[in-house]
Image (tube, rainbow, N blue to C red):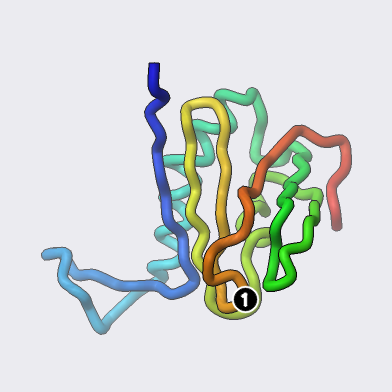
Amino acid sequence: MKKEITEWKLTSQCVCIDDNDEPSESCYDCYVDELDLFKSEMLMPYLAVKGWEMDTPIKVTNSRLGWRGVSGYAYTTPEKLIEKLALDGEWTLRFEFDGHDLTAIRYSHDEPMGTGKFEFELSDEIDD
């Protein structure tokens, strides 16, 4: 049986639309609005499945980051997840949630083909 996958795109390059879904010159906090929607529509269901809260310590890992393709990890909480994944500059995060696991891939100037998948696991540490 194939799992249903929910996808979400969050970007630092905000594209504003009007009530008719047409591009709009005026914009009010569309990034903040999109972030709030991501949290309520994707992150909260993921946390519910895992039994985690917004302040639960998690470890974020990835095996292919930046133009050199290095591996790395960070400790954070779901509340601060986007801050850990975002870069200074333009970026796009593409999330996938299969009903149990959440993954993300980041695209940026140094990662035009995308990073490896960011994966999240329970931790007992948090970076300050």
Q: Residue furthest top?
A: 1
Task: Identify the residue position indicated by label 1 in the image.
Answer: 110
Give the answer, above or below, for where 86 lies relative to 2.
Answer: below
The quadrant of the rendering that contains the N terminus is top left
At 41% from the left and 34% from the top, the residue drawn is 5
Q: How many marks?
A: 1
Q: Position of residue 10 (x, y in %)?
A: 46, 60
Q: How dense is the environment of label 1, judged by Cα within 10 Å: few (below 14), some, or many (20 and up)?
A: some
Q: Residue furthest bottom?
A: 25
At 39% from the left and 22% from the top, the residue drawn is 2
Front-most of 3 and 128? 3
| 99 displayed left or right of 80 | left
Give the answer, above or below, for where 103 lies relative to 46.
Answer: below
At 80% from the left and 49% from the top, the residue drawn is 75
Q: Position of residue 45 (x, y in %)?
A: 49, 31
Give the answer, above or below, for where 77 lies relative to 34.
Answer: above
Front-most of 123 and 39? 123
Quadrant of residue 123 within the rendered picture: top right
Amino acid beneath label 1: Asp
At 71% from the left and 51% from the top, the residue drawn is 62
Question: Could you tell me which secondary element the residue under label 1 belongs to?
Answer: loop
The quadrant of the rendering that contains the C terminus is bottom right
Q: Position of residue 90 (x, y in %)?
A: 53, 77
Q: Residue furthest left?
A: 20
| 52 displayed left or right of 48 | right
